[in-house]
Amino acid sequence: MAPPDTQLQRPSESSRSARTRARDEQLRAALEPLAPDERPAPLKVAIVVSALMGIAVAVGTATIHDLPTHGGSIPGGIFLFSLLEALAVGMYQQRYWAVVSFEGLVAFQMLVASLALVLASTITAALGCTLALFLGGWLFWTLIRVMGRLQATTLAAAAAPGTQAADGPTVASHTDAGVGDSCDRVA
């Protein structure tokens, strides 16, 4: 048997979760899907950053003499170049997986910059780490809304019977199959 004060907290927790669900639904409804050729400024910045970082990795891999003594390898450079360029192309094509993956790289960069800030021995190094944290944080935060709009685009495409979502399978309604009209199913 649960203590009496936990029983009293349950109604407020359920009403709080109901309010949270209602607020989340309102926020989702307010997101307008991206147009096919629309690329918001944060997405453009992410595409350019990813492409330029890939080019920088390729140039660094090709020009650094005796790369293994500097902690690198040619296969590693090729892998990073391919990854960053694939993310840039995926983000240009408005793929959700590419934006999420790039967000993971930005989060990792922010973690490394914060650790480097702790170890910074000069003012210049500390300012560079702080700038990297600020810019990475701005990009991370602004891409969250872009990801929401990409999901809204996918959901809008899924709501239209017989259409193909950008990242998913073709969606057909039950009325197309003669079953009923209460739900949609993935075909």
Image: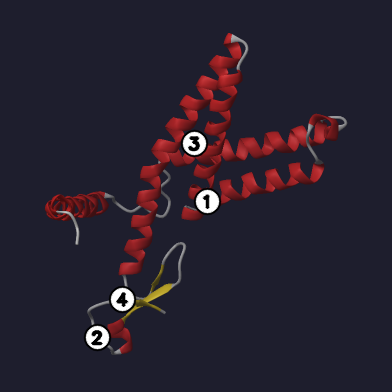
User: Residue 55, position in %: x, y?
Assistant: 68, 37
Earlier residue among tags 4 and 1: 1
User: What's the distance in space between the residues labelled 1 and 2, CA to CA?
Assistant: 36 Å
Question: Element type at marker 1?
Answer: helix
Q: Is residue 163 left or right of residue 20?
A: right
- The residue labelled by disc 3 is 45
Amino acid of disc 3: Val
Look at 62% across and 35% down and name the residue there: 52
Earlier residue among tags 2 and 3: 3
Can you say whether 47 is above or below 94 in the image? above
Question: Element type at marker 4?
Answer: strand
User: What's the distance in space between the residues labelled 2 and 3, CA to CA?
Assistant: 45 Å
Question: Element type at marker 3?
Answer: helix
User: Residue 7, position in %: x, y?
Assistant: 14, 55
Earlier residue among tags 1 and 2: 1
Amino acid of disc 4: Asp
